[in-house]
Image (spheres, rainbow, N blue to C red):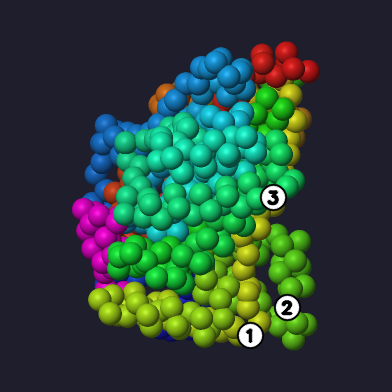
């Protein structure tokens, strides 16, 4: 492995029909390509808007997709759910949510989750961006919202759960999930996940301070930390089957960022670890839209994050902890689940991998046995989330959760404007400024093109699809470019990840009238 092709090497399934539960992995030499661990200094990793010129769509590939085919691809993983204003337990501040995913990796390494808390109040929404494969994001998407919900439950509620388990009776449901047709679960690992969730609530029961349950921010923080600990331990202990053990190790050695929002009548709590993002769409008095960030990206562009990380290691490592904008020159997100190659000692890593060698493809082990440079004082990585709280106001209209594949292609402000105008059906145009009146004819023509692009009609009822369409298909003046969009969607599997990332977007619409009543 060359020094610049490192880290988050993508493990792709041998075909799209390979079960996500299968322990089989393709040849690394056959399937290696660049992911967001990146390829520092290579100049190979491209972005759609700036670099499509390097690929001749006419000579090298056939990108002839019709408008119907484009919409069919974009809408394949759409989800739209309306929430009852009153469900028997209280009023809901969420009116509805819309979500969508578009894969670049095969299989998709992004995951998403949405659920109503049945034993407490509020709803949970999550976006999970996997790397080094989909295994960690899959496990986190299945488990994390349960950990949050259980942590918020009261002592009495937890006692009822435990009593039902002891009596082998049905356990009261904790979450009402809103699943999409394309979502799936680790069925073989379900018993393990339930067992460890039970250990979690038993420990909460043993705590004399649990009482009425944790507050949403405490529950979010504790759930992130506890689940990551469980993922680490599960990879180190024996299991009832080789498949479960293989899955546990893949989950631990792969990684996933996570951004989770708890939305209740009192406000929105966001927990973020990594480079997914939460943004609030605010409608100002004049009808315009503004973006209020509810999370910060944990990457090398965040100076505070860099200083936090460097402070945890000796001064002699100040210049090596983050190099080429990556953790140890490899990992772009600076917080994540899993990724035990950046958390465990080298001795523990080797011991765990050697215990799995029989029956496991060599390339799978070789990838994880690669030692990051300057690996001197682990751990270098943590999943501790950064918490944000926002008290809801009548002008707060929607929340956008997105994986970094969305934010690579558009700014938070652009995303909020697109969703806001999609919601209102009104495309605001600022008056021509005195400076703009001085433009020459060519410059005025360009200005008119840009203003015309903003007024183009919406093609998708689903706002998340609307975001993805614009993320990949926006042209020079902000207009939707059919040829660009067709090019991006028709890229073969082995090329797609070089030009775009997996994209996940969830738009949560808020009940402004209910917020007014509570003020």
**Label 3 vs label 2, nearer the camera:** 3
How far across and how far down the image is residue 57, in percent?
30, 54
Label 2 near label 1: C-beta < 8 Å?
Answer: yes
How far across and how far down the image is residue 95, in percent?
55, 21
Q: Residues within 10 Å of mark 1 (few under 14, many from 20)?
A: some
**Label 1 vs label 3, nearer the camera:** 3
Q: Earlier in the sequence, mark 1 or mark 2?
A: 2
Quadrant placement of the C terminus: top right
Residue located at (53% from left, 84% from top): 346
Considering depth in this image, is 234 or 338 the residue closer to the camera? 234
Helix, strand or loop: magenta stretch: loop
Q: Residues within 10 Å of mark 3 (few under 14, many from 20)?
A: few
Q: Earlier in the sequence, mark 3 or mark 2?
A: 3
Q: Secondary structure at mark 3?
A: loop
Left or right of 234? Residue 375 is right
Asked whether the viewer can see residue 437, the reply is no
Question: Which residue has dot 3 on it?
Answer: 207
Q: Real-space Cα distance between discs 3 and 2?
A: 33 Å
Which residues are drawn in magenta?
10-29
Question: Which residue has dot 1 on it?
Answer: 376
Q: Earlier in the sequence, mark 1 or mark 3?
A: 3
How far across and how far down the image is residue 189, in percent?
36, 55
User: Number of marks in the image?
Assistant: 3
Q: Residues within 10 Å of mark 2 (few under 14, many from 20)?
A: some
């Amino acid at each position: 492995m060359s020094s610049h092709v490192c880290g988050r090497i993508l493990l792709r399934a041998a075909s799209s029909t390979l079960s996500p539960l299968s322990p089989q992995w393709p040849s690394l030499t056959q399937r290696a390509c660049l992911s967001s661990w990146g390829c520092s200094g290579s100049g190979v990793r491209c972005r759609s808007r700036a670099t499509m010129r390097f690929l001749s769509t006419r000579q090298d590939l056939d990108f002839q997709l019709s408008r119907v085919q484009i919409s069919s691809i974009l809408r394949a993983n759409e989800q739209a759910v309306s929430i009852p204003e009153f469900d028997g337990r209280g009023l809901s501040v969420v009116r509805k949510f819309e979500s969508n995913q578009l894969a670049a990796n095969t299989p998709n390494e992004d995951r998403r989750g949405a659920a109503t808390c049945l034993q407490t109040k509020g709803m949970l929404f999550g976006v999970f961006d996997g790397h080094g494969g989909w295994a960690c994001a899959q496990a986190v998407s299945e488990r994390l919202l349960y950990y949050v919900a259980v942590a918020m439950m009261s002592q009495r509620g937890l006692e009822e759960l435990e009593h039902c388990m002891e009596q082998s009776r049905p356990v009261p449901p904790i979450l009402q999930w809103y699943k999409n047709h394309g979502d799936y679960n680790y069925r073989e690992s379900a018993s393990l996940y339930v067992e460890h969730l039970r250990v979690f609530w038993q420990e909460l029961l043993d705590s004399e301070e649990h009482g009425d349950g944790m507050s949403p921010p405490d529950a979010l923080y504790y759930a992130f930390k506890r689940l990551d600990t469980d993922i680490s331990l599960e990879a180190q202990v024996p299991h009832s089957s080789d498949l479960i053990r293989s899955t546990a190790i893949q989950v631990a050695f792969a990684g996933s960022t996570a951004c989770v929002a708890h939305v209740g009548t009192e406000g929105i709590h966001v927990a973020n670890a990594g480079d997914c993002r939460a943004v609030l769409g605010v409608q100002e008095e004049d009808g315009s839209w503004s973006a209020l960030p509810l999370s910060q990206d944990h990457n090398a562009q965040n100076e505070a994050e860099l200083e936090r990380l460097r402070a945890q290691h000796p001064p002699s490592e100040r210049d090596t902890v983050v190099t080429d904008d990556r953790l140890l020159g490899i990992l772009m997100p600076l917080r994540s689940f899993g990724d035990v190659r950046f958390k465990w000692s080298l001795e523990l890593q080797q011991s765990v991998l050697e215990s799995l060698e029989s029956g496991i493809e060599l390339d799978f082990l070789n990838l994880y046995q690669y030692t990051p440079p300057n690996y001197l004082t682990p751990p270098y990585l943590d999943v501790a989330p950064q918490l944000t709280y926002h008290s809801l106001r009548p002008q707060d209209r929607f929340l956008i959760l997105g994986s970094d594949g969305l934010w690579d292609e558009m700014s938070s402000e652009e995303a909020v404007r697109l969703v806001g105008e999609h919601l209102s059906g009104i495309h605001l145009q600022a008056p021509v400024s005195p400076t703009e009146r001085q433009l020459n004819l060519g410059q005025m023509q360009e200005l008119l093109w840009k203003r015309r692009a903003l007024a183009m009609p919406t093609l998708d009822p689903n706002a998340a699809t609307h975001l993805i369409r614009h993320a990949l298909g926006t042209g020079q003046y902000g207009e939707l470019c059919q040829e660009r969009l067709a090019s991006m969607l028709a890229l073969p599997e082995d090329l797609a990840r070089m030009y775009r990332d997996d994209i996940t977007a969830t738009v949560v619409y808020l009940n402004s009238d209910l917020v007014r009543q509570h003020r």
